[in-house]
Image (tube, rainbow, N blue to C red):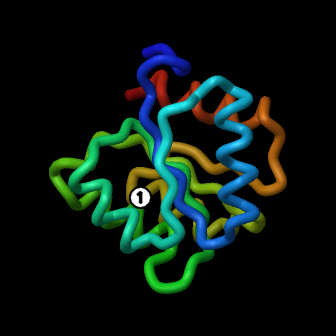
C-alpha cells in the first residue's frame, strides 16, 4: 500500500496543538487523506461509518481514552482490521500490556520526530 496515495488515517486527540503536530507530521510524510476527531466517542462513531486503515490516538482523553477507543474498535466487526497506534507522552508498562492484549499495533511517544512517526506507520501498514 502506498503511503501517499491510498492510506486513510484518523487522528484522535483532545488537544488541538497535538492534533496539529500529528497532522503536520502526516503532511510531511506525504499522507494527505486523514480525518481529525477531538474525542474517543465521536471518533468511534465516525469509524463505524467511514473506513480507515489506521488510527493515531492519544491515550489521555476525557470520556473514552485511547485504550477505550482501541477496545471499541477491536470489538466492532467493521473496524477490527484497522491499524492502531497510541500516541502518548507517558507510556506505562500497564498501558503497554493492556494495549497488546487489545490488539495495539504500536506506540509513539510524545514528543516525536517525523521520522519516528513515519517508521511507526510503515511498520503497522506493513502488517495490514
Q: Is residue 34 above or below residue 45?
A: above
Q: Residue furthest left?
A: 77
Relative to residue 79, is residue 39 drawn left or right? right
Residue at position x 69%, y 62% in the image: 88
Relative to residue 101, is residue 14 drawn left or right? right
Name the image quarter holding the C terminus: top left
Residue at position x 41%, y 58% in the image: 101
Snapshot quadrant of residue 28 = top right
Residue at position x 68%, y 66% in the image: 16
Nearer to us in this view, 36 or 117: 36
What SS does tag 1 mark?
helix
Nearer to us in this view, 71 or 115: 115
Give neighbour class at mark 1: few <14, some 14-19, many 20+ (Cα, 10 Å): few
Snapshot quadrant of residue 6 = top left
Q: Which residue is mark 1?
A: 101
Residue 10 in the image, given as x and y percentages of width and height: 47, 48
Residue 108 in the image, given as x and y percentages of width and height: 69, 49
Q: Is residue 110 above or below residue 128?
A: below
Relative to residue 100, is residue 93 drawn left or right? right
Relative to residue 117, is residue 45 drawn left or right? left
Residue 69 in the image, given as x and y percentages of width and height: 41, 66
Name the image quarter holding the N terminus: top left
Residue at position x 58%, y 55% in the image: 86
Residue 39 in the image, given as x and y percentages of width and height: 48, 72
Amino acid at each position: 500500500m502506498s503511503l501517499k496515495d491510498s492510506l486513510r488515517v484518523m487522528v484522535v486527540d483532545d488537544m488541538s496543538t497535538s492534533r496539529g503536530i500529528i497532522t503536520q507530521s502526516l503532511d510531511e510524510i506525504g499522507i494527505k487523506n486523514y480525518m481529525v476527531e477531538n474525542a474517543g466517542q465521536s471518533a468511534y462513531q465516525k469509524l463505524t461509518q467511514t473506513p480507515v486503515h489506521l488510527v493515531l490516538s492519544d491515550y489521555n482523553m476525557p470520556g473514552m481514552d485511547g485504550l477505550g477507543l482501541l477496545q471499541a474498535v477491536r470489538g466492532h466487526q467493521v473496524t477490527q482490521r484497522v491499524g492502531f497506534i497510541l500516541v502518548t507522552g507517558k507510556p506505562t508498562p500497564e498501558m503497554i500490556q493492556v494495549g497488546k492484549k487489545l490488539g495495539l499495533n504500536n506506540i509513539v511517544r510524545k514528543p516525536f520526530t517525523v521520522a519516528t512517526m513515519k517508521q511507526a506507520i510503515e511498520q503497522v501498514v506493513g502488517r495490514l
